[in-house]
Image: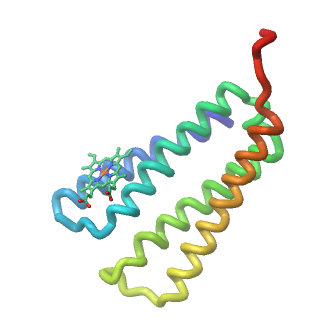
């Protein structure tokens, strides 16, 4: 699963840098938190998880690792959409903001708890190798 996580992460890197360039060129800085989450959660956190699962494939390929992959990769884009539409410049019904931020953020939070549990369950010392 490590390679899959790393491939997903580079899409966020591209999106985050592109979004940063857009904000910079238009001076539309109200999306700084969205941009920061695309880069820091989407790119850096995702690539870190991918590297850990590349070193410990048994953790990445476990049932917990797979469940975490789907919760994370459905939750994060939904949360980011919520963080984007929360700005007054985007006229959407408040319920849509609540659903995306709480739904996406909730799924992401559960996936992070699963990741922590997975690390403690399936990442083992390789000192004997
Ligand atoms: C070409 C690349 C990038 C451009 C043009 C860019 C542009 C920007 C801009 C215009 C802001 C808003 C600043 C403000 O509100 O005054 C910002 C904020 C931020 N950027 Fe980037 N960015 C880029 C890449 C990255 C990368 C690669 C990361 C992290 C890995 C990153 C992390 C952040 C963070 C954490 C903030 C929030 C700072 C704050 O709110 O105090 N950016 N960026």
Q: Position of residue 42 (x, y in %)?
A: 49, 50
Give left or right: position of 4 versus 126.
left
Q: Quarter of the image containing the C terminus? A: top right
Q: Position of residue 81 (x, y in %)?
A: 47, 69
Q: Position of residue 17 (x, y in %)?
A: 32, 48
Q: In which quarter of the image is residue 23?
A: bottom left
Residue placed at 76% from the left, 17% from the top? 126
Q: In this view, does 22 lie above or below 54?
A: below
Residue placed at 83% from the left, 38% from the top? 121
Give left or right: position of 105 versus 27.
right
Give left or right: position of 38 versus 124.
left
* Of the pair 92 and 127, the residue shown nearer to us: 127
Q: Is residue 11 above or below residue 51?
A: below
Give left or right: position of 70 versus 96.
right
Q: Position of residue 119 (x, y in %)?
A: 74, 38
Q: Quarter of the image containing the N terminus? A: top right
- Figure label count: 0
Residue placed at 55% from the left, 81% from the top? 98
Query: Which residue ends up furthest to the top in the rendered image?
Result: 129
Residue placed at 80% from the left, 47% from the top? 64
């Amino acid at each position: 699963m490590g390679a899959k996580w790393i491939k997903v992460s580079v899409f966020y890197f591209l999106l985050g840098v592109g979004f940063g360039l857009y904000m910079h060129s238009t001076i539309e800085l109200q999306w700084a938190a969205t941009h920061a989450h695309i880069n820091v959660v989407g790119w850096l956190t995702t690539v870190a998880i991918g590297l850990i699962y590349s070193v410990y494939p048994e953790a990445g390929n476990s049932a917990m690792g797979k469940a975490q992959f789907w919760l994370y990769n459905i939750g994060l884009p939904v949360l980011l959409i919520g963080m984007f539409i929360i700005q007054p410049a985007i006229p959407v019904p408040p319920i849509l903001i609540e659903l995306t931020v709480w739904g996406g953020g909730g799924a992401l939070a559960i996936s992070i708890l699963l990741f922590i549990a997975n690390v403690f369950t399936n990442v083992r010392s390789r000192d004997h190798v």
